[in-house]
Image (cartoon, rainbow, N blue to C red):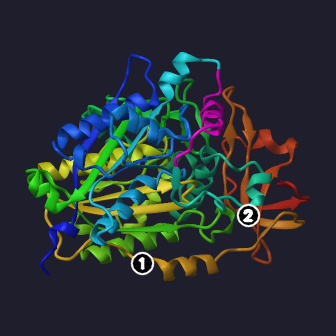
Amino acid sequence: MSLDPTHTPVLVGLGQSIERDDVITTVELAARAAEAAFDDAPGLRERLQRLTFVSVIFSPASAAIASEACERLGLGEVARETTSPGGNTPQWLMNRACEQVVNGELETTLILGAETTRSMKLADPDRDFMRAALESREKDGPKDEVVGASMRGMLHQAEIEAQLVRPADTYPVFESALAAKLGSDLEGSRERIAGWMSRSSEVAAKNPFAWFQQVRSAEEIATANPANRITAEPYTKCMNSFANVDQGAALMVTTLAIARELGLADQAIFPWAGANSADLAPSEREDLGDSPALRAAAEATFAAAGVGLDDIDYIDLYSCFPIAVEVSANAIGLAFDDPRGLTQTGGMSFFGGPGNNYTTHGIAATALRLREGGRLGYATGNGGVLSKHSIGIYSNQAPSQPFRVADTTAAQAAIKASALDVVLEAEGEAVVAGGTVVYGRDGAPASAPIIATLADGRRVVATPKPEILASLAGRSLVGETVRVSGGHPVEYAL
């Protein structure tokens, strides 16, 4: 099939920025990334029709940050919009933009984002940075249009009542379920994770935009000590995404016809296919160590692109917490020690975790590798708690068919139909499907939430009775039977 260049999307402008020393605003750091993308694709700035700013979650940013970025960059009357929260949004925006190019609805757009958490903490070290970021968005004033699916439904009321709401607590619950399937204890889990994370740190060490540029040994990553405490079983601090960064990234999408006109065709990266999907609330999922939605999106993307995993040269899996990488790898049959690696950036523990905008960096890093050689790249984004997924396949060669966003409607319906009933009150025995022990900075257990299955198949989310909390340190309850009682929240005893 001959492609129509006026309806063939290409990624031609790539820009990243980082600030390690001075205090900087989110808009200014994003502008640096945008200017780098403009420099990478001369002439495309003047053709820009729309700027989309990826939702800022860790740093102060107004609800009109897209407009502020446009003013800072002198872009005139281009369309301005921001996104709903979610680490999947940069890839979702790529999928949407490419589909709009194919449909003749768009020619040139800029996807832009930044987080300046480090700067904010330096400027006001006593301020709650998450609250400060939220307050900055809620102030009265102009607001940009918001695009993308909301996080509504991401959590069940049972999880909220049990205070199982922070990703740093929920992802370890998923990890415990995977560990049980692999026959691994807590120590074994840390060792397994540390192995592939050490190899990821080698990638970060070579990345000029990575926050930490030193290789970490598996032993260093897995060993708990005062500088690397266990945050929530089985994760050490080093296994968590590192959000205290100042990083920005920008992607410019246009048509192949415009790229040729501006002499940019040789650097063009072709998106071949993409897909989007969503999972149930954690307690509604039958298998806490898997993601049917991610698996469906991956399969649909490969099918739409007409390629398989063996054809892929470069891979970047969303890496907020280890289980996100592991589930994503399992979904496509990728071994954790695959010689191609699991990241092009170094992963969010070592490259840095600039909120929702990480995937913009992941796509940029994958595209840069494709400019150097190889043929195909695979990038994923994940929002919430393995809740929303977006995937893309990229190439330095034109596809044999037009880009398309694969249809996951049937899979999505099946996922919705598989939801387990979750109760807010319970009495009796339940088998633990997943759980973790969360520790305070003093090293003592602070909480130990579990998701468990009652005898009738319904799910319950529970917290330990206060008198047993201390005894749960260093222990996994997955597969054990506990006694649950009460409600709002449900409690459990051994």
Q: CA distance from mark 1 to mark 2?
A: 33 Å
Vertical placement of 369 versus 415: above or below?
Answer: above
Amino acid type for the residue under numbered disc 2: Ala
Q: Which quadrant holds the N terminus?
A: bottom left
Up/down of 301 relative to 136, above or below = below
Q: Nearer the viewer, residue 258 or 26?
A: 258
Q: Is residue 132 magenta?
A: yes
84, 44: nearer the viewer: 44
Going by the image, does 316 lie left or right of 64? Answer: left
- Left or right of 262? Residue 99 is right
Quadrant of residue 400 within the rendered picture:
bottom left
Q: Residue at x 85, y 61 (%)?
A: 483
- Place of residue 441 in the rendered image (x, y in percent of width and height, measured from the top left): 66, 27
Q: Secondary structure at mark 2?
A: strand
Q: Quadrant of residue 38?
A: top left
Nearer to us of marks 1 and 2 is: 1
Question: Of callouts 1 and 2, which one flags the residue occurring earlier in the amino acid sequence?
Answer: 1
Residue 21 visible in the displayed image:
yes
Specify start and end residues of the magenta stretch as a single range.
127-144
Q: Which residue is mark 2?
A: 452
Above or below, comparing residue 414 to residue 185 in the picture? below
Disc number for residue 211 = none
In the current view of this chain or complex, which residue is farthest to the front? 77
Based on the picture, tell me whether residue 350 belongs to the magenta stretch.
no
Q: Locate residue 51, reporting x and y percent.
A: 38, 48
Q: Can residue 354 be spotted in the picture?
A: no
**Residue occupying image coordinates x 59% and y 36%:** 230
Residue drawn 84% across and 67% down? Answer: 429
* Residue located beneath label 1 in the image: 407
Residue 177 rendering spot, x and y as whole percentages: 59, 60
Name which residue lies at 8% across and 53% down: 266
